[in-house]
Amino acid sequence: MSARSIFLALAVLPAAALAQGFAGLGTNADGFAIPQPDPQFVFPADHGPHPDFRIEWWYLTANLTGPDGTDYGLQWTLFRSALRAGTGDGWQSPQLWMGHAAVTTPDAHFVTERLARGGIGQAGVIADPFRAWIDDWQLSGASDWSDMTLSASGPSFAYDMTLTAEGPLVLNGADGYSVKSAEGLSSYYYSRPFLDISGTLTLLDRPVPVTGHAWIDREWSSQPLSQAQEGWDWFSLSFETGAHLMGYQMRQTGGSTYTTATWIEADGVATSYPDGAFDARPLDFTTIADRTVPTTWRVMLPERGVDVTVSALNEHAWMTTSIPYWEGPVSVSGSHSGKGYLEMTGYDGD
Amino acid sequence: MTVAGLQALLSHWRRNPWQLFTMIAGLAMATALWSGVQAINAEARASYDRAANALGQGQYAQIVGRDSAPLDQAQYISLRRAGWLVSPIVEGELDLEGERFRLTGIEPLTLPRGADAPAPLELSALAGFIAPNGEILVHPDDAGTLANTDHSFRPDPGQTRGTLTADIGLAQRLLKTDAITMLLVLPDQPLGQPPLSTIDPSLVLVEGQGQGDVARLTESFHLNLTAFGLLSFAVGIFIVYGAIGLAFEQRRPVFRTLRTLGLPLGRLLALLAVELTLFALAAGAIGIALGYIFAAALLPDVAATLRGLYSADVTDTLTLRPAWWLSGLAMALGGTAAAASGAFLRLNRLPLLASTQPRAWAADAQSSHRRMAIIAAFLGLVGALFAAFGSGLLAGFALLACLLIAAALALPLTLDLMLRLGSRLARGAVPQWFWADTRQQLPGLSMALMALLLAMAANIGVSTMVSSFRLTFTGWLDQRLASELYLNTTSPEEAALLTGYLEDKVEAILPIISIDTRIGDLPAEIFGVLDHATYRDNWKLLDAVPLVWDRLAAGDGVLVNEQLSRRENLSVGARLGHDTVLGVYGDYGNPAGQVVLGMDAFHARYPDVAALRYGLRTGVADPKAVADDLRRKFDLPPDALVDQARIKAVSLQVFERTFSVTAALNILTLSVAGFAILISLLTLATMRLPQLAPVWALGLTRARLAALELVRAVCLAAFTGLAAVPLGLGLAWVLLAIVNVQAFGWRLPMYLFPLDYLHLGGLTILAAFLAALWPALRLARTQPDALLKVFSNER
């Protein structure tokens, strides 16, 4: 087993870790802090890291359009994973960092990954002024996330983007306390769904100017998994009406699911929905890397009259990272139309 | 019929167990020597690969400080932040439990995939590895030694003995440094990466090589071993050839009977092939087992040699690797096929009702001698072409191969000429019969004698090379280690303190100051030397400009060692960078290139490098008294002061171990040749009765006949020995003047050691005598009726 996969097995991607049969992590917090109900977030401090929690991420996805109308997807993620709670100087720091960056076009998917130790300056997050970085990749700007720049590079692609906030932060679950399973496993979880983004993608040395819409997720936790959970399917959808929908289902052994959703009005007013309100069913599958992955979905939130078909822009948006998963842009049609992002983890090889 | 045929064929071996033993033993010995050598090579290469993978040496490009200055952590971070995907490595020596270990610190998250963490780090282990007091990976054999230390160790067969691998954080703490030794550059770098020079001009990018430096440097050593293994194999195959040929000849009546009973020729050949394949597999398996034992016995010496000569870490425990045992089996099969091909061809051409005369195979000896001589002449020509136009180590070995095979092929004709001369000089019936009969024996013995020739020539050649090397090396050590005492300090402060104290107590204090660098992408060292009589008087330069030491002191240029001079084609007067080469000096036993600068020039160029080692010329003072005084005064550890004699002893020890492998192979090859003679004589003895019976009937007693047999064996061995001397010296010349230069980068003067050759000649004659003794005794005890039967049997 390579050092990289060990890193991942330490559960930066909870469902992926589950998929590896590494379920123990999910139920035992080992001296780490545990999310409590009724959180009182303090900004900008909470944009920064929470080293007493086991895992944390800064997750940006964007739907982009080129000058010729071509659709693109962009992902930039910084994960933090702690071997032990707390901080330390230099190499003694128990904090580990991982970055994933990807660009999806209708017929190509570029992925790259970075790993770093905490404590030595190679990667980290500072809240004020905001700066999240690993190696030369960076998401940085004003402490209120109103204006930021974003960059990443890989062997065959790079991007350089500017972000402008158009709406408020949205707290998912109960004021940012998000329950993940019937047993009560939980995380702190908030989103920033209203961001304009523009800049340049470099694809195999070819520059492409793009504009579009971005979404940032922030989540941290110490025990987000239940032993019975196999993986998850996560949707962030932006409708042409200006409303947004975040919904996901945790797939449990035996075929049952645990679902959560947040409906966000165009003015930023958000409503959370408990288990069962949101429904997602696979319509069509694609075989990628010896796995069968659903790439067309029927997604429903009946209380908001949502009944849409969600289709992958590129069905082969497979993240060939240390622990692989599917993540890519989608288009939405049906009761509502729009664009969005889909992440699916825990799909084992056949 | 097939089964009956096979039974009939196999019954021959039941009736002639000796022949079976000969064939199996010959093949097993040949395979043993070959697979033993291959096992050693495979083990060493696996060790290099392990080391190269663990450190990524060679495989990956590296970033190092200019002039090997260590890097600091901020430089690592600034490179990563600029988009350079690099992984830090720290290396150093660590004393634990009285033993010195080489500690490598790695950063598992950024380490290139191919150079993955050297142990199969399990899921739970990364946390244990990265932890502040994390696990240190250690070879299982070393784990016991370290059991009582404060650290936690994890036995890992992937480690080389004497090395430890730890997380970089822990390694830095243990080595008491914040520095990084080098950065490995990952193969896939991102787009838009700025050039290294704009990020940090003090860093140097060293391109990776296909294989590590160590593998490159030691390649010649392994090629040497392989060549030796091949030679031993060839000698062994001579035995097999003899045994198979004889068995075929003796079974002619059986073949004829089987054929007349209706067994088709094709099936007969197939049955014989099956029979030989079975023998080859059996002998191959025995050979591989013997080879394993042989390699296991020699490996510690080889490992010590490689460590001493090249600082290459090779484990001294042997693993069964498919690479070498498969190659051993293949060689056994291939060798048998080669040895049997002639016999098969003859059988294929054999008329159905051919005479069963066992001497038929020797009948046209004359023409076959001539044929072999023609091939020998041709090979000699090819060899001359290699000598004239070839370059590189392989050409050197090709020349050796041509030389040896040509000489072996020319041997029967040469011996025939010598014997003819003998018979011409002979007076009286018995001597004349003796010479004529010896000539008659020649075809049957020639294979064994060729084997003897090769073994002796190899012995003479290699011992001449080793002895020449030893003579040159010890002389060179005397020149080089002129200072009576060598002082090692740990810091410039300590150095200043100690040299200050010694100022008026010794005649001269000569700093030994150097930095490691690379020239032409290979490791090299740059030294600074004071202008002192020690160098002027003791260093023998191979070539130099007039007033070389004055010009060196004045900073006019540099001296280079012979290795560098040959490698980079730098003769006196050539330019090395901005410097003129003022002289070339011999530097035996050092794989790296060396450049010597005057001390002032060195300081001007490398102001940050301080000397930590010093040579002390004690002059009239007693070195021991000086050493004792210094130790007492400053409470120095034992290795802070080393006397000249000890360094010489250590150097010579390395040297002797280097060639202990060669010596062992030499003895083994000679034993195989001796065995070949024994076997040939034994088999000939059974066929010789018809030739001896008439002589016996004419009045020569059996004892006299037996004595003559012994004299004959000794004569033939002596003649072969005489032929082996010039061949061996030619071999030595090729080894010293061509192979050695290619392999090590220096040329050694050739010395002759007549007493050694005489000694070897004596040994050979003794071996031939012993080999002939048993057949002779058997002859002396042959019952008269057996001799009489010769006349009654219809032949």
Image (cartoon, coloured by chain):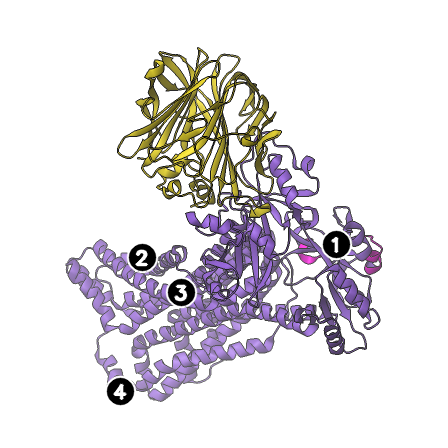
Chain colours: A yellow, B purple
The amino acid sitting under disc 4 is: Pro
Neighbor class of circle 2 (other Cα within 10 Å; few <14, some 14-19, many 20+) is: few
Q: Is residue A49 shown in magenta? A: no
Q: Are marks 1 and 2 in contact (CB under 8 Å)?
A: no
Q: Of circles 2 and 3, which is in front?
A: 3
Q: CA distance from mark 2 to mark 3?
A: 35 Å
The disc, 1 or 2, on the residue closer to the chain's N-terminal end is: 2
Asked whether residue B402 appears in the rendered view, the answer is no
The amino acid on which the numbered mark 1 sits, given as a three-letter code, is Val
Task: Report in which chain the residue with disc 2 lies.
Answer: B
Distance between the alpha carbons at the discs numbered 1 and 4: 89 Å
Quickly name the residue at label 3. Answer: B292
Question: Could you tell me which secondary element the residue under label 2 belongs to?
Answer: helix
Task: Give percent across and percent down for residue B557.
Answer: 80, 52
Please tell me the numbered disc located at residue B368. Answer: none
The residue shown at (68%, 74%) is: B645
- Mark 2 vs mark 4: which is more N-terminal? 2
Label 2: which residue? Answer: B345
Q: Amino acid at mark 2?
A: Leu
Between marks 3 and 1, how big is the CA–CA gap? 48 Å
Residue type at mark 3 is: Tyr
